[in-house]
Amino acid sequence: MRGAFFWANIDKIMLLAFVGTFVSSLVVGLLVFAAESVLTLPGGHPGFSLAEALTFGALISATDPVATLAIFEQLNVDPHVFNIVFGESVLNDVVSIVLFHTFANCIHHTDGNIGSTMATAVMNFAFIFAGSSMVGFFLGCCSALLFKHVRLSTQAVEHGPKLELAVFLIFCYAPFLLAECLGLSGIVAILFTGTAMKRYTFNNLSLAAKQTVETFVSLLAHVAETLIFIDLGTSAWQTFRASLALVIWIFLSCLVARAAHVYPIGWLLNASRPAYPRSRFETPDMHMVWFAGLRGAIAYALSSQFPGPHRRCVMSITMWMVLSSVWILGGATVPVLKWLGIRRMESEQLKQLSLTLEPAVNRLRLVHWDRKYMLPFLVRNVAELTCESVEMQENYSEEAAGAESARSGIRMGLVTSHRQPHVAPGDALLSTLPEADDDAVDEAE
């Protein structure tokens, strides 16, 4: 994920991840709660209570579009769409986890009043999310200061990068323990710790330690996700504790819930005046973001923690929701990309477009604060990062000057005659880039 594209679409990502996930949880939960005639549970159990329905809505709203993102990367899909889907999925998981635990706490502490239940959930969500994020970010910054002022690689030469890796991993896990001890969310704390450590701590490591950390953390991520899907696959052979009508109803509810927030948020963003130059949220892009709402490991892991007598039923429903979304939505990603006409580009074009977005991104207050205050305070060799960025910008400027006349005659991507988007700085270059060959799509299929 290139930082320029992430920050250029930060408004879309934040609204989809926070507002969108909350809306999705409510819509799914209320649809499940309202359809008691369809949701007849096996074994004579009564239907879901309101708190149980909202808890299920929160866990099933956790998206995990791994298959979609893999196809996006293979086909060099428009980086704006890629980063919207990726950024939303990362933050969406965190919001879903906090909402899940918030609603779960209301299952045994509800008076049946919808307003009271929702007010309690909102207050708990705000407290847990704010507290967890502060704990995680604070410890991440502490790790950056430690590696900045203590050169572990020179003080323990005989250990090589292993000592740096060990201390790095301790700081990765410590926020989880601290947050859980404080009654907060350890997973949310880890997310913000990881963000801070990637931005600041990682740049203070030795070269050997950087390579070791990247390899080891990537290995851990793949192993963890593989184990969850192994558990998911073996669970598919267990007794199915829900009706087919129940699964179909919830699958359709998830599609409706995703549409209920993706399109209104997109229309709202397009109607508002942006605080900084950005691309419009075009209708085909909205369709693709809506279609990329696959369910995955996070939803299934949360279902195993569902409180109450309906846990086995919820696990069965979630398992089939994950499998169905991966098979149906993931398998149809390539044809949908072709049908919607989503733009694609090569790596060199991606690099050039990223550099054109830098001036606009640098004007963001958060980015400005980070580069002016946080980086000098937490990173040892800020000058090296700055020089590298300046060198890339100068190289691009020289190349762009010679290629400007050639690019001016290229037609606009896949934009049709009836679609007249607002072109922001940086998107002008994107719209003039040539399309990737359709053979790449055929090979992917």
Image (spheres, helix red, strand yellow):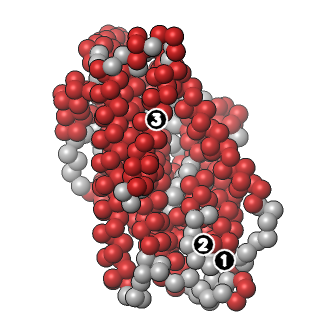
Neighbour tally class for label 2: few under 14, some 14-19, many 20 plus, Cα within 10 Å: many
284, above or below 127, in the image: above
**Closest to the observer, 250 or 319:** 319
What is the x, y in percent for residue 249?
62, 75
Q: Earlier in the sequence, mark 3 or mark 1?
A: 3
What is the C-alpha distance between the residues marked 1 and 2? 6 Å
Q: Earlier in the sequence, mark 3 or mark 2?
A: 3
| Res 246 label | 1
Say which residue appears at 56% left-offset and 72% top-offset: 307
Q: Secondary structure at mark 2?
A: helix
The amino acid beneath tag 1 is: Leu
Say which residue appears at 42% left-offset and 68% top-offset: 102
What is the x, y in percent for residue 177?
44, 49
Judging by the rendered image, the residue that carries numbered circle 2 is 250
The amino acid beneath tag 2 is: Ile
Say whether residue 398 is visible: yes
| Res 328 label | none
Q: Check if mark 3's residue and mark 1's residue have beta carbons within 8 Å.
A: no
Q: Secondary structure at mark 3?
A: helix
Q: Check if mark 1's residue and mark 2's residue have beta carbons within 8 Å.
A: yes
What is the C-alpha distance between the residues marked 3 and 1? 44 Å
Neighbour tally class for label 3: few under 14, some 14-19, many 20 plus, Cα within 10 Å: few
Q: Which of label 3 and label 2 is nearer to you?
A: 3
What is the x, y in percent for residue 192?
37, 43
Judging by the rendered image, the residue that carries numbered circle 3 is 170
The amino acid beneath tag 3 is: Ile
Tell me where residue 286 sits by quadrant: bottom left
What is the C-alpha distance between the residues marked 3 and 2? 40 Å
